[in-house]
Image (tube, grey):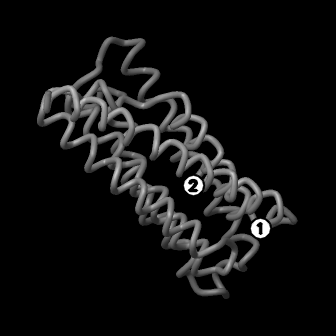
């Protein structure tokens, strides 16, 4: 713990703090860092941030430090990292604009859905499912490969297309869960 802040929460905050540094790498002058060096540094920062996504949840469960604040902050950190990464990749012309739009819009929509479900006491109904975890894994690997940009763009973009498909499938899965709750509450 850092000053009474549980380690899982510190890791989540670290992920949020790393986002501007990750993006800022690409704004460094070329005489300070060549593009291949920027790619390696940005990929390293992104990978560190992505790893904290796994460990903050794992440690929170293992150390019995799960909290409502952590449950709120974790998806915010995830969305910030993914959205910033996708914007950077589109700006660098390394991935598809439509993929970034679909993924970002889905993230916002499902976050709003989860917020609404929490307000009606049904947050567990749209808890992260296996399809969501698979989507996140595919998305993170795709982003990492596309950031690296070392003969990895073809595989990265194939994985990005798979992530888009999983994004849509998981979105419809969560919407179906919410629809069932809505129908049950309306009856």
Considering the numbered disc 2 on the image, is that residue within a helix, a strand or a loop? helix
Residue at the limit of the structure toward the front, as seen here: 187
Asked whether, in this view, residue 6 is left or right of residue 175, the answer is left
In the image, residue 132 above or below residue 35: above
* Residue at 64% across, 57% down: 143
Residue 5 in view here: no
Question: Tag 1's secondary structure?
Answer: loop
Q: How dense is the environment of label 2, judged by Cα within 10 Å: few (below 14), some, or many (20 and up)? A: many
Q: Position of residue 99 (x, y in %)?
A: 58, 66
Judge whether 137 appears above or below 56 on screen.
Answer: below
Mark 1 lies on residue: 149
**Cα distance between the residues tagged 2 and 1:** 15 Å
- Spot occupied by residue 118 in the image (x, y as percentages of width and height): 18, 34
Closer to the N terminus: mark 2 or mark 1?
2
Decide which of 75, 10 is in the foreground and name it.
75
Where residue 124 appears, as percent x and y from the top left, is: 29, 24
Q: Which image quarter is the C terminus in?
A: top left
- Residue 61 lies in quadrant: top left
Could you say which disc has been placed on residue 45 in the image?
A: 2
In the image shown, does 131 or 35 lie closer to the viewer?
131
x 42%, y 12%: residue? 62
Splitting the image into 4 quarters, where does residue 155 fall? bottom right
In the rendered structure, the answer to whether residue 24 lies left or right of residue 40 reads: left
184 relative to 141, above or below: above
């Amino acid at each position: 713990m850092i000053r009474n802040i549980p380690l899982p929460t510190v890791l989540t905050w670290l992920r949020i703090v790393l986002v501007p540094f990750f993006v800022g790498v690409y704004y460094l002058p070329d005489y300070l860092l060549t593009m291949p060096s920027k790619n390696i540094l940005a990929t390293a920062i992104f990978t560190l941030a992505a790893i904290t996504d796994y460990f903050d949840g794992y440690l929170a469960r293992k150390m019995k430090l799960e909290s409502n604040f952590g449950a709120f902050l974790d998806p915010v950190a995830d969305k910030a990292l993914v959205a910033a990464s996708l914007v950077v990749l589109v700006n660098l012309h390394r991935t598809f604009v439509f993929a970034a739009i679909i993924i970002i819009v889905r993230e916002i929509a499902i976050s709003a859905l989860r917020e609404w479900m929490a307000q009606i006491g049904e947050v567990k109904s749209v808890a992260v499912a296996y399809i969501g975890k698979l989507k996140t894994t595919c998305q993170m690997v795709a982003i990492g490969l596309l950031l690296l940009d070392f003969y990895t763009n073809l595989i990265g973009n194939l994985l990005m297309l798979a992530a888009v498909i999983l994004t849509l499938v998981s979105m419809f899965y969560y919407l179906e869960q919410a629809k069932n709750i809505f129908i049950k509450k309306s009856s």
